[in-house]
Amino acid sequence: MKEVGTMQLPNPCTLCPRACRADRAHGQRGFCGADGTLRVARAALHHWEEPCLSGDPNAATGSGTVFFSNCALRCCYCQNYPISQGDVGKEITVERLTEIFLALQKSGAKNLNLVTATQYLPWALPALDAARAAGFALPVVYNTGGYETLETVKALADYVDIWLADVKYASPDLATELSAARDYPAVAEAALRQMLRQTGAPVYDADGYLQKGVIVRHLALPGHTDDSFAVLALLARIRNEEGVPFIPSLMSQFTPFYKAAEHNLGRRITTYEYRKVIDEAVRLGLTDGYMQEKSSAREEYTPPFDLEGV
Ligand code: SF4
């Protein structure tokens, strides 16, 4: 084990369900691309998350978002592919990450939004501890593709107020083809159930900003409405079995980034397809959340990864 701040980097690495067992402490890169250093690609106010996180897109405030480099999933359509599967990012220290968290709070952020942080938890958690000791008090959002171990979710119980988690697929075959993760459906379901158990029902402040709870995102993919239906059925079942409300967030913004076209995802979703998915969500009562407008398939949702704020 290599000591990093107050938490250890497992050696070999088993921080995520991939459990690729890379010897990161000695510089070996894992399946996710991370090695023994912390890399961050952007830290800035972000205006395009769900309104209960970002507020009015034209307001001076927003979600204080930190984009970490690398990712344990290999989504062929990833809109953040320059940082998730490319090499964009800058090596920084725990001390610098602490300063970044405090600077986002000072800039008026409504929350701290950690995007794909799991491979860097041995750095991020000590940075959160240090920031809190220095007066940091924002709700912490954990923005994840949903591919998390139960151990990781449990380890974050005292750190994360809001889970912003994808449930991407119900089909192992589709998860294999599009994200190279056959176990994704089972892993994401178990992780989501644990998030709900430890976080509870949504809590908002007087201005409507979420302070605690779980937002479950599902991005509807062109040509795969059947799998979206299966995901929605799963979400309805989880809601009924766990008895804990969550905020569903249906997304239509799929844009054929990166290698999408090589996997029959070379177009945006049609209005007809997306309408079918929305109708099914309504039929299942998954309505106490967000349904993105079909006109939202715009590239502005993807910020420039120019190392701003890092
Ligand atoms: S976090 Fe990265 S290095 Fe660690 S197990 Fe997952 S893929 Fe491998």
Image (tube, rainbow, N blue to C red):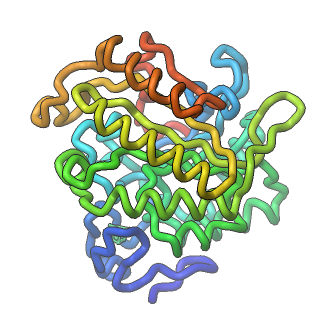
The residue depicted at 30 percent of the width and 40 percent of the height is: 82
Residue 15 in the image: above or below residue 197: below
The quadrant in which residue 287 appears is top right
- Total residue callouts: 0
The residue depicted at 64 percent of the width and 44 percent of the height is: 246
The residue depicted at 37 percent of the width and 78 percent of the height is: 13
The residue closer to the viewer here, 3 or 286, is 286
Q: Position of residue 93 (x, y in %)?
A: 54, 64
The residue depicted at 47 percent of the width and 79 percent of the height is: 9
Q: Position of residue 251 (x, y in %)?
A: 45, 28
Taking the image in four quarters, ligand 1 sits in the one at bottom left
Task: State the residue lying farthest toward the bottom.
Answer: 1
- Quadrant where the image shows the N terminus: bottom left
Q: Position of residue 90 (x, y in %)?
A: 42, 52
**Residue 40 shows in the view:** no
**Residue 21 shows in the view:** yes
Task: State the residue lying farthest toward the left.
Answer: 262
The residue closer to the viewer here, 186 or 153, is 186
The quadrant in which residue 29 appears is bottom left
Q: Is residue 123 left or right of residue 70?
A: right
Q: Is residue 136 left or right of residue 38?
A: right
The residue closer to the viewer here, 67 or 181, is 181
Task: State the residue lying farthest toward the right.
Answer: 206
Residue 256 in the image: above or below residue 243: above
Q: Position of residue 291 (x, y in %)?
A: 53, 23
